[in-house]
Image (cartoon, rainbow, N blue to C red):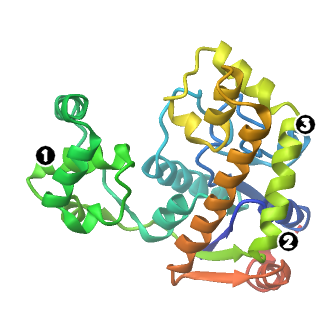
Amino acid sequence: MLIPIITGPTGVGKTAISIELYNSYNIEIISADAFQVYRNMNIGTSKPDVHVLNEVPHHLISILEPHEYYSAGKFVENAEKLIEEILSKGKLPVIVGGTALYIDRLVCGIFNDITKSGDIRSKILNEALEKGYDFLYNKLGNIDSLYATKISSNDHVRIVRALEVYEKFKKPYSTVMVEHHVNPKYKYKVFFLQKKREALYEIVEKRIDDMFNNGWIEEVELLLRMGCTTDKPSFKAIGYREIAEYIKGNENLEETKRKIKKKTRNFVKRQFTFFKKLGYIDKIDDKNSIDNFFKTYYKDYKK
C-alpha cells in the first residue's frame, strides 16, 4: 500500500488540501514539520488553527517543549509507529508538511543512530571551543570530503555528528551511513504542491505581516519569559531569533520584518532546490491530481 505524502514549499496550501481530504476520507494527519512539534510556538510555525486541530485528528504537533531536541530519525520513528496505529484502526494516515529532510528520510530510509557517546561528543565540543568550528569543518573535509561538500560550514550540528561517528567507527560518516542504513517500513506516494515562486513570495510576505498582527512578538516574549534562549533547537525556526533581537532592543521592527521575509524567501528557494533533486515526487499545480488519485487508490477509505 502507498501512504500519501502532501508536501511543498511554505505557503503553498498543504494544510488546506489536507482538511479538504478529511472532509471526504477517513484520514488522520501526521505532521512532517520540524518546528510545529514545539508547544507555545503556534503563530510563527503556522500551526493549523485550534478549531482545526480539535476537529481533524493531527499527530506530532505540540509534543515537545521548546528546549527539547528533535531530529529526522525521531520523526521517522514516530511517524512509522503512527502509520501502523492509524492503519490498524481502518483509517488512512496522510503525511503533511514541508520539512524536506524528514520527507526524504521517511521515503528512503535512515541511518541507524547507534553511535551517540557523551564522552566523544564532549571532546569534540571542547575542541570547537578551543579552535572554532571552521577548524572542525576543515577536519571533516580531510576525513570525509564527500559529506563535507553536502553541508554548510555553519551547520555545527552535522559537523559534530559526522566527527562523532568517525571517532566511533574510524570510518567516514558517508560510509557508515550506507553500512547502517535502515530501509523504510512503508512505501509512499509523494505529492509536491507547487506555485510560481513570485506568487509564493507574495503569499509568505502577507502571511508574515499577519503573524505580527496576530501576536507573534507576544509569543516570542512568552518563550523568553519561560526561560527559552535563542540557542535552543526550537529557535532555529525562521523569525524567532530575529524577533528576540528586536525585543532586546537590538533591532527595529521594520528591519526585523525585512530580515524575516528575506530568510523565508530563501527558505522557499531551498525547498524547491531540494525537492527538484528527488526522483520520487509528483509535482502538481492544484489539488485535482490528488483528488483523482484518492478517488482511485483510496476509495475504500471514502466517508
Residue 16 in the image, given as x and y percentages of width and height: 86, 61
Residue 246 in the image, given as x and y percentages of width and height: 70, 27
Front residue of 284 and 3: 284
Residue 167 in the image, given as x and y percentages of width and height: 12, 45
Farthest-out residue, left:
170
In the rendered image of this protein, does residue 91 appear above or below residue 108?
A: above
- Disc 1 versus disc 2: distance between alpha carbons? 50 Å
* Pointer 1 residue: 168
Residue 239 appearing in the image: yes
Residue 172 appearing in the image: no
Front residue of 280 and 275: 275
Amino acid tagged 3? Asn
Q: Quadrant of the N terminus?
A: bottom right
Amino acid tagged 1? Lys
Query: Does 265 sit left or right of 156 as displayed?
Result: right
N-terminal-most mark, 2 or 3: 3
N-terminal-most mark, 3 or 1: 1
Q: Quadrant of the C terminus?
A: bottom right
In the rendered image of this protein, does residue 267 appear above or below residue 246?
A: below
Front residue of 107 and 162: 162
- Disc 2 versus disc 3: distance between alpha carbons? 39 Å
How busy is the neighbourhood of tag 2: few (under 14 within 10 Å), some, or many (20 plus)?
some
* Pointer 2 residue: 302
* Pointer 3 residue: 213
Amino acid tagged 2? Lys
Residue at 20% across, 61% down: 176
